[in-house]
Image (cartoon, helix red, strand yellow):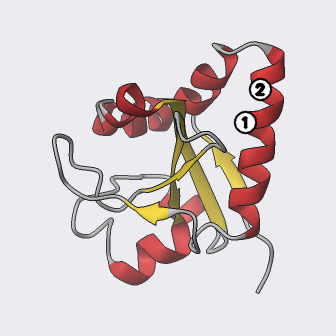
Amino acid sequence: MAAYVPFFTEAFRNCVQAFPSQRQERIKGLVLRVLQNPIGPPSHPLKKKKVDLRGKRARHDERGRYVLVYMVCRECRALGHRDAGYNNCDRCEDIPENGVVLLAFGPHDDTYARYWDEVIAEDQAK
C-alpha cells in the first residue's frame, strides 16, 4: 500500500499557527505518526455524542490533553461516510485513496466541540 498523503484544511493550519513553534514541532511529529498508520491504534473512530463526529478519527498527543482530528479518504469511501452525510467533503474527487484530511488540533474538549460542518465548508470555499 502506498504511503498516506496529508491534506491540510485551513482550519487545521489556523489551529497549528496558534501554538508556539516548539508545540508546532510536536504536532508535526504527531501528523507523521498518523500518516504511518492512520487507521490503526492508537487512533480511534469518533462517534455521535454532543457533536456528531462520525466519519472522523482522532489521535491524542503523548499526554492525552490535545487531540488531532482527521478523516481517512480510503476509510470514508469504503464505509460510505460521505454518502451518509458524515463527511461532506466536496474535494473528495481531488484527493486520492491514500489521502488523510487533517481537520483540527487543539485541547481535547475544545477541539471536539467545534462545528465540523463549518470546518469542512470553510476549507471548500478556498
Residue on which the image places disc 1: 27
Q: Kindly indicate the quadrant of the structure image that contains residue 63.
A: top right
For residue 88, side relative to residue 72 (left or right): left
Residue on which the image places disc 2: 24
For residue 105, side relative to residue 31 (left or right): left
Q: Residue furthest left?
A: 50
- For residue 5, say whether it is visible: no
Query: In front here: 8 or 42?
Result: 42
Q: Amino acid at mark 2?
A: Gln
Quadrant for the C terminus in the image? top right
Asked if residue 78 is positioned above or below residue 67 in the image, the reply reads below
Q: Are marks 2 and 1 in contact (CB under 8 Å)?
A: yes
In the rendering, at what x and y percent does residue 41 appear? 57, 71
In the rendering, at what x and y percent does residue 116 appear? 33, 38
In the rendering, at what x and y percent does residue 54 appear? 28, 59
Residue at figure coordinates x 66%, y 49% from the top left: 7
Query: In front here: 110 or 88?
Result: 110
Quadrant for the N terminus in the image? bottom right
Q: Amino acid at mark 1?
A: Ile
Q: Secondary structure at mark 1?
A: helix
